[in-house]
Amino acid sequence: MPSQKVLEQKQQIVADLADRIQNSVAGVIVDYKGITVEDDTKLRKELRENGVKYTVIKNTLIKRAADKAGLSGMDDVLNGTSAIATSAEDYVAAARILQKFADTHEHFTVKTGYLDNEVITVEKIKSLAKLPSREVLLANVLGAFQAPIASFARAVQAIVDKSGEAPAEEAAAE
C-alpha cells in the first residue's frame, strides 16, 4: 500500500496534467520505446522550441488526467511506454513534429491525440502533421489579402504615370 505522501504526489501530478490538457488546444500521445537518448534530446529540443510540452508519464496517470479533463476513449491505447505532448496555442505543432519523428524512427509510434478536447484518430493526426506551421498559414492568408490591394495600387500608379506623361508631351509639342 502506497504511503499517503506518495498518493498526494500522484494526485497532484494528475491534477496538473488534467489542467494542462484542459488549457491546451491539441495534444498527442506517443509510444517512445526504442529511441536513443540523443534522439530523445533532439526531439525534446524541437518540441520546446515550438511551444510544445512533452512529458513521459505512467499510463494510469494519463488515463486519470484525461478522464478528469473530460477526454474519454484513450483507454485502449494507454499501454506500454507513453509520453504526452501538449500545445497551448499551436494546433499542429505537436502532431507535425512527432509524426515526422515517427516516420524516421521505426519503434516510435503515435498512439492517439486530441484536438479542442475531443479525441482524434491517428489518421487525423497524420493529416494535421501535413499542414504547414501557423506562421506559414498566416503568411499565406496575409499574401492573399495583400494581392488585390497591391494590384489596385499598381493600377492606380499606372494611371498616374500615364496621366503625368501626357501633359509633358503636350508642353513639348507646343
Image (spheres, rainbow, N blue to C red):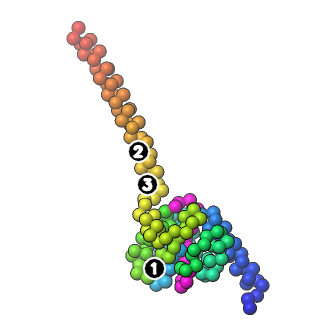
Secondary structure character of the magenta stretch overall:
loop
Q: Nearer the viewer, residue 125 or 84?
A: 125
Q: Nearer the viewer, residue 99 or 39?
A: 99
In the rendered image, the vertical position of residue 143 relative to residue 104, given as above or below? above
**Please, what secondary structure does the residue beneath circle 1 have?**
loop
Which sits earlier in the primary sequence, circle 2 or circle 3? Answer: 3
Per the rendering, the mark at residue 144 is 2
Q: For the residue marked with disc 1, what is the amino acid?
A: Phe
Instruction: Say if mark 3 contacts mark 1, CB within 8 Å.
Output: no
- The span from disc 2 to disc 1 (Cα, nearest Å) is 38 Å
x, y percentage for residue 39?
46, 78
In the rendered image, the vertical position of residue 152 relative to residue 162, given as above or below? below
Q: For the residue marked with disc 2, what is the amino acid?
A: Ala
Q: Nearer the viewer, residue 116 or 156?
A: 116
In the rendered image, the vertical position of residue 8 relative to residue 158, given as above or below? below
- Residue 20 seen by the camera: no
On the image, numbered disc 1 is attached to which residue?
108
On the image, numbered disc 3 is attached to which residue?
136
Is 52 displayed left or right of 155 in the figure?
Answer: right
**Please, what secondary structure does the residue beneath circle 2 have?**
helix
Q: Quadrant of the N terminus?
A: bottom right
Q: How many marks?
A: 3
Residue at 66% over, 77% down? 64
Q: For the residue marked with disc 3, what is the amino acid?
A: Val
- Picture quarter containing residue 71? bottom right
Which sits earlier in the primary sequence, circle 3 or circle 1? Answer: 1
The span picked out in magenta is 78-91
**Please, what secondary structure does the residue beneath circle 3 have?**
helix
- Can residue 82 be found in the magenta stretch? yes
Question: Which residue is farthest front?
Answer: 73
x, y percentage for residue 60?
63, 81
